[in-house]
Amino acid sequence: MSNDCKAITIICKALKEDVGAGDITTRGVVARSIVVQGKIIAKEAGVIAGLPVAEEVFRQVDKKIKFSSAVKDGTWVKKGEVIATLTGPAQGILTGERVALNFLQRLSGIATLTHSFVFRVSCLGSLARILDTRKTTPGLRELEKYAVRCGGGTNHRLGLYDAILIKDNHLAIAGGVQATVSRIKKEGWRRMKIEVEAKTLAQVKQAIALSVDRILLDNMNIKILREAVRLCQKAGIKTEASGGISLKNVARVAATGVDFISVGALTHSAKALDISLKVNAG
C-alpha cells in the first residue's frame, strides 16, 4: 500500500466502530489464557487483496497474534485455498476477526472484479488500460484504489487535487469546451495535463483544436466512439471511454482502439469475495 499511516488510521477507526468499549461476548466466554490457531480461507475463487490490512487489524488488537500470509496480494486463489494463518490469544483473534474479514472481503471483491475487466480486454490483445474512478466508499479510497491495482487495473486521479478533468457541469457553468479549456490554460495550473469530457463529436473536435492532453468520451455508442477515437488518434491525443461500461460490453469498447476505459463499478458495485476464518484450540 502506498500510505501505511493512512491505512492504520482507517483500521483504527474501523476497530473503534466495531469494538467500542470492548468485546463483551468474547470476554465473557473465552479465558485470556487460551491460545488458538486459525486459518483464513477463500470460500470462492478470486483475486486476494488486503492481507497486509488484515494483519495490521490483528496487530492493533493484540501484538501477540502472529499472522502469516500464505499468498501475496494480487494472487488468484481457488475455492477452499488457505490464504493466511494466525496463532495467538483467542480473545484477540475473535475480537479482530470481523473487521479483518470485512477489509479482506471488500478489497478482494474489488480486485476480483477488476481482474475480470482486465482479462476481457487483454483477451483481445488490446492495450487499453482499465481505470478506476472517484466512486469509492467514503474514507476507504486509498484502500479501494490499492485493491484495483491488485486486480491489474490502473488508478485514475486520487482526488480533485492531483489532475485536471473538466466534466460536463464545468462546461455548462464555464461556457463550453473552448471557453473552459482556454481559461484553465491561461491560469496555468502548474502546467498539469488537461483532460476534458466530450459527449458529442462536435465537442471532441473542439477539444482537439485546443490541444488538450486527453479526451474523456462519455456515454457514446460504439459507432460514434470509434469515430471519436479515430479523430483523436490522428491528432495524437489520448482517449478514455467512460459511462455504462460493463463486462458485457468492455471488449467492444476496447476494440475501438481507446487508450483507457474508466469503470465506476470497480469500486461502487463490486461483490465481496466470500472469505472466512476458522479457529482450532492450540
Image (spheres, rainbow, N blue to C red):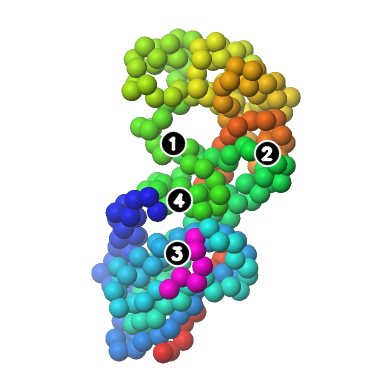
Magenta region: 68-73
The residue carrying mark 4 is 146
What's under tag 1, amino acid-wise?
Answer: Arg
| 71 falls in the magenta region | yes
Is 213 above or below relative to 109?
above
What amino acid does circle 4 point to? Tyr
Query: Which residue lies under the disc numbered 3?
Result: 51
Left or right placement of residue 42 versus residue 248 in this view: left
Direction from residue 48 to residue 118 in the image, left or right:
right
Which residue type carries mark 2? Ser
Residue at horizontal 30 percent and vertical 68 percent from the top: 60
Q: Residue at x 58, y 20 (%)?
A: 236
Label 3, secondary structure: give it.
Answer: helix
**Residue for badge 1:** 157
Give me the C-alpha separation between circle 4 and circle 2.
Answer: 23 Å
The one of 6 and 255 positioned closer to us in this rendering: 255
Element under label 2? loop
Image: 20 above or below 117: below
Query: What secondary structure is the magenta-colored segment mainly?
Result: loop
In primary-sequence order, the first of circles 3 and 4 is 3
SS state under label 1: loop
Residue 69 forms part of the magenta stretch: yes
Q: Which residue is labeled 2 in the image?
A: 126
